[in-house]
Amino acid sequence: MDLERLLSDRLAPAFSAVAGGPVDPLVRRSPRADFQSDAALALARRLGRPPRDIAAEVLEHAVLDDVCVSAVVSGPGFLNLTLADVALADMVSGLAGDARLGVPVTAAPQTVVVDYSAPNVAKEMHVGHLRSTVIGDAAVRLLDWLGHRVVRVNHLGDWGTPFGMLIEHLADLGEAGAAHELSMGDLDGFYRAARVKFDADETFRERSRLRVVALQGGDERTLRLWQLLVAQSERYFLTVYDLLDVTLSEGDFRGESAYNDLLAGVVDDLGRLGMLVSSGGADCVFPVGFSGRDGEPMPLIVRKSDGGYGYPATDLAALRQRVGELGASRLLYVVGLPQRQHFAMVFAVARAAGWLSPPARAEHLGFGSILGGDGRMLRSRAGESVKLVGLLEEAVTRATDLARRRNPELDADAAAEIGRAVGIGAVKYADLSTDRTKDYVLDWERMLALDGNTAPYLQYVHARIQSVFRRAETTARPDTPVVLTLPAERALAVELLGFAAVVGEVERSLEFHHLAGYLHRLATAFNAFYERCPVLRAPDELRESRLLLAELTARTLRQGLHLLGIRTPERM
């Protein structure tokens, strides 16, 4: 049950009657009541009337008696709405028998392509890959749960001139030796060794250039060596995804090389459409509305002066394939904010070419950076990018130590299981609870805290509820009537009924800090309820009602955290 939508549906006809046309009631949570409507203030100028008079007339038309105990005009013209306890209790009772907790499957499913993670072959994943992978995985989980057809695309960097150097180094090592070295997971070491040879040895440099020509020309042995490099890298990436507990799999890899055969067609079609302009020997498109600092139109270079293709051509080819072959109507690109202009230009060119037209739409889900305690980009002590595996292993180690200190009786396996759930959850939640367009500081003490807006706090509240049921030696009965006798019970009921509205909002915005914020409010409301409303010592009728409220809280926390890719241990 979406309370905001319920109240909006009740108020909309009344506002329309007063305004003479459709009006959004603008219902939201209120600090002075359960909800408030702000629409009368927005209508005042249009109707030339005082907003309080408009609000009062709306109340005369609105049918609210069966859901609200109070509906009053407040302040300059707000409508303050307080729900009736009986209606609130009935709606919460309805959640008990609903496996989806009031969240409907979408009535208009779309094919959604989510492009995320995107590491580079022969390079280890570093902390810079964390946000794309975590945000993209949350988007996939949420959209899939809502009933959309979701296609994961892990756009690997597996092509380009550096591969001549890498393949030549691999050839020097021999296939067996290279396969062994790469299987050890030290991709950065392999890359650095190749780079050292390239920088120091003119003969190796020339061989590397020839190897690029052989690769692009389809030489059989060169392609086999390249495939070995890609396969070993993908094997390593899958171990990282397993540790991070994300849903990316082997079938989701799609490298840049997959679009090679489509690039010439992209450029040819842009030429036929009259969109290509030669600039400095390169083939460019100048999308409307983009200019440099000098005020001159800014080009999107689709074919370089040497005849090679750059990222814009690959991205245009991928977009065409996703819309044309996959039938995507929503394309999501989970890439850092520094690429904002690039994607804006790619989307503009695609629209101008007719390759991206309604109902298909593309969105760049940009995100900020992860900072160290000094407020600068997070780096290792040696000044290098922090390896993602190292960061995740440190999170698990810290969380496991914390679990052992809190519960010395835990055996090694239980401590390790809790440590992984809490450690990985803490890393993900620190990311997802932050507005994705903002930078955030990686702070272990805050991330792993058992209080505040953190994953361990939410996991602790979930585990606390499981402890209640273990002590009760029973489960909640879904047919139990909910009884609301105290303010803390009522506040928890209102929060439980807010899940559907938040999920609907995040489906549209993909701003997961709203979902995280809701889960934190729910957990906080439960803790207040637990402290003020005895559960196991309550009289039978109240006991059953409060057990049901606890069970609904646990289910909502579990489902909400699952959508964020975070596990909920039974014990902490």
Image: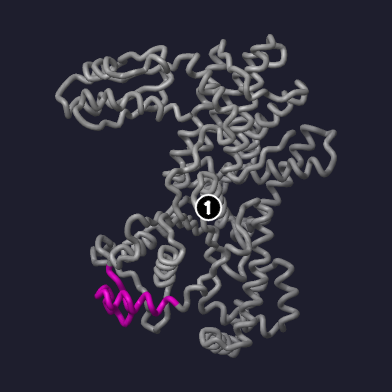
Please, what is the three-letter code of the amino acid marked with disc 1? Answer: Gly
- The residue drawn where x is 71% and y is 78% is 178
| Residue count near mark 1 (Cα–Cα under 10 Å), binned few <14, some 14–19, many ≥20 | many
For residue 472, what is the image quadrant?
top right
Q: Quadrant of the C terminus?
A: top right
* Quarter of image, res 171: bottom right
**Colour mode?**
one colour
In this rendering, position of residue 301 left or right of residue 149: left
Q: Which residues are magenta?
A: 262-286
Magenta span has 267? yes
The number of discs equals: 1
Residue located at (76% from left, 26% from top)? 470
Q: Residue at x 47, y 46 (%)?
A: 436
Q: Could you say whether the residue bearing mark 1 is in a helix, strand or loop?
A: helix
Which residue in the rendered view is the most extreme toward the left?
48
Q: Residue 484: where, in percent of width, then height?
A: 56, 14
Q: Is residue 283 above or below residue 556?
A: below
Q: Can you give x and y, in whole percent of width and height, for residue 347 in the image? A: 35, 61
Q: Does 77 appear above or below 291?
A: above
Residue depicted at x 46% and y 41%: 506
**Rendering coords of residue 315 (x, y %):** 42, 67
Q: What residue is shown with label 1?
A: 136
Q: Does residue 386 show up?
A: yes
Is residue 213 covered in magenta? no
Percent position (x, y) of residue 377? 53, 53
